[in-house]
Image (cartoon, rainbow, N blue to C red):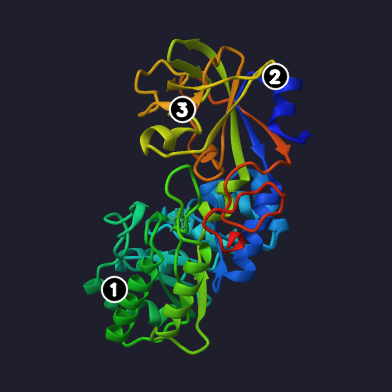
Amino acid sequence: MHSYATPYNIVRSQEPDVPVYCFRPERVTAAAKWFRESFPAQPFYAVKANPGLHVLDALWAAGINSFDVASENEIETIYNRFPGARMAFLHPVKNRRAVSRAYHQYGVRIFVTDTQAELQKILEETNYAKDLTIIVRIGVSNDGATLPLTGKFGATEDDAAAILREARRYADELGVSFHVGSQAMKPSAWATAMADVSRIIISAGVTVDIVDVGGGFPSIYADTPPPSLEAYASMVEASFENMFVLENAELWCEPGRALVAEAESLLVRVELAKPGSLYINDGSYGSLYDAVHERWQFPVRAITGNGRKLRGMAEYTIYGPTCDSTDKFPEKVWLPAGLTEGDYLEFGNIGAYGRAMASRFNGFGETDVAIVHDAPWPSLYNAVGAEVIAIGSKATK
Ligand SMILES: *Cc1c(COP(=O)(O)O)cnc(C)c1O
């Protein structure tokens, strides 16, 4: 992987034909350091947010050695890359043979369930192993989440107590978990969820060894900045103190987005300009999935192919590369006027759910990766590079 000072150097020296992920390892280090040192819970990185091996390597190097995995493929990736890593199989609906292989081949000991049937499956496929950590996922409100995740997973209050009691009979360690939704803009969502979960633990009458507060911690994009991450940390810490759990209970979390969003940007080429329109080489079937389907406001800047200076701004409709007419940004984007074929756009903070979402539809989807060392995008972490703008973080106050 080549290393450049900035994406400008990539454009000048390569004029790349395929989209290039600009990987900023320092951003991963800063995020991992914050979660390890300033957040009160042990982080299990949610691999689905960005399974790129260079990203996983940077997380590992920064001391993230526990992983939230959801499929056998993710388990195999982590197992092969980091022998000895701790994995938690946290998908509430697992393939039966994947459970067996996770336990017997890959050494996974932590499993989630939100039903009696899934608990039974886990017990059967591990031959009622005595060293299981069973996490019972409980459904909670997703108020304030930009991407709510309710409705699909999480035991109801009525079911949860019975599942907890049954799991307690077999589990070496018993945990509870919940997920408040992704890009959760309200720290109070954790306070509400943890109070609800605590009530359920009391009604179940079980002892709980682990409270896993899930993922959903935000990153910063071009629209309203989230509260500071410190606000989330203090909310979780205070809420944990009020929970009905063992005094030495452990606190875990499963951040995906917050650990890797700042890790990568995406450099795309303008293949054609029409008046008011740009056709670029990534779109709704690529890493810009969320920009189109979820109207995500990634910050963006233009880099001219030949270094010319542009004056003034213009509104553009942006089209992706595939033949599907829905492969188009839902809203116009303000960019410098006069952009043309051979110019580039760089979308910032696309490290979470960017490459993870890309498909090969229509034969597109080939990409490249380069390391860069600038830090032009908004950040929720303390500056590593001097240029970092830490909006919404205590570091700026
Ligand atoms: C997706 C997911 C996460 C990570 O969510 P983020 O919003 O990226 O932090 C964590 N845990 C589970 C169970 C998930 O499904």
Who is closer to the viewer here, 197 or 242?
Answer: 242
On residue 138, the disc is none
Location of the C terminus by quadrant is bottom right
- Would you identify the image quadrant in which residue 90 lies? bottom left
Tell me, yes or no, if residue 382 can be seen here.
yes
Location of mark 3 (residue): 334
On residue 160, the disc is 1
Task: Tell me the amino acid under the disc marked 3.
Answer: Trp
Marks 3 and 1 sit apart, C-alpha to C-alpha, by 49 Å
Residue 175 picture location, percent across and down: 44, 75
Who is closer to the viewer here, 140 or 161?
Answer: 140
* Residue at image point 40% right, 85% down: 242
Residue 32 lies, with reference to residue 58, above or below; the image says below
Residue neighbourhood size for the residue with mark 1, other residues' Cα within 10 Å, grouped as few (<14), some (14–19), many (≥20)? many
Residue 96 picture location, percent across and down: 42, 56
Task: Tell me the amino acid under the disc marked 2.
Answer: Gly
Q: Secondary structure at mark 1?
A: helix
Of the two numbered discs 2 and 3 on the same chain, state the one appearing first in sequence: 2
Considering every residue shown, the one lying at the far left of the view is 158
Residue 322 lies, with reference to residue 45, above or below; the image says above
Considering every residue shown, the one lying at the far front of the view is 312
* Residue at image point 67% right, 21% down: 16
Location of mark 2 (residue): 307
Who is closer to the viewer here, 154 or 220?
Answer: 220
Location of the N terminus by quadrant is top right
Task: Tell me the amino acid under the disc marked 1.
Answer: Ala
Who is closer to the viewer here, 270 or 57?
Answer: 270
- Would you identify the image quadrant in which residue 302 lies? top right
